[in-house]
Image (cartoon, grey):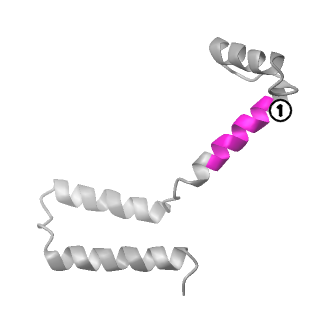
Amino acid sequence: MANGLSPQNEQFLNRAIAEGLFPSTEAALDAAVSALREQSEAIPFVPAEHAALVDAAIEAANAGQSREMTAADWESLRQKVRSVAHRNSGGA
């Protein structure tokens, strides 16, 4: 199987297999992909529409179409974040 690994990674993989950590290249690569998936699941998904809103806000700020945040603005933002976090954690 062509795996596209760098020579250093292929050597590391072969050594791990030779030392009995994995029974085969496929098993080692499966374990690596599983570990990457597990690590990636901890990274929150940002919906495209949210990223687009952030990009638009940055563009507006760069164009001078922004104002300094007030204490009320920050509190409103905190409440929205708490609400979303509560919803995403299974809360009503």
In this rendering, the answer to whether 45 lies above or below 12 is below
**Residue 32 inside the magenta-drawn segment:** yes
Position of the N terminus, as image quadrant, is top right
Position of the C terminus, as image quadrant, is bottom right
List x then y, in percent, for residue 7. Answer: 66, 12
Q: Nearer the viewer, residue 6 or 24?
A: 24
Determine the residue positioned at 69% across, 17% down: 12
Determine the residue positioned at 42% across, 64% down: 50
Q: Amino acid at mark 1?
A: Ala
Residue 78, located in which quarter of the rendered image?
Answer: bottom left
**Residue 52 inside the magenta-drawn segment:** no
List x then y, in percent, for residue 49. Answer: 45, 65
Q: Which residue is mark 1?
A: 27
List x then y, in percent, for residue 26. Answer: 83, 30
Q: Main secondary structure of the magenta part?
A: helix
Magenta segment boundaries in residue numbering: 28-38
For this view, does 76 lie left or right of residue 65? Answer: right
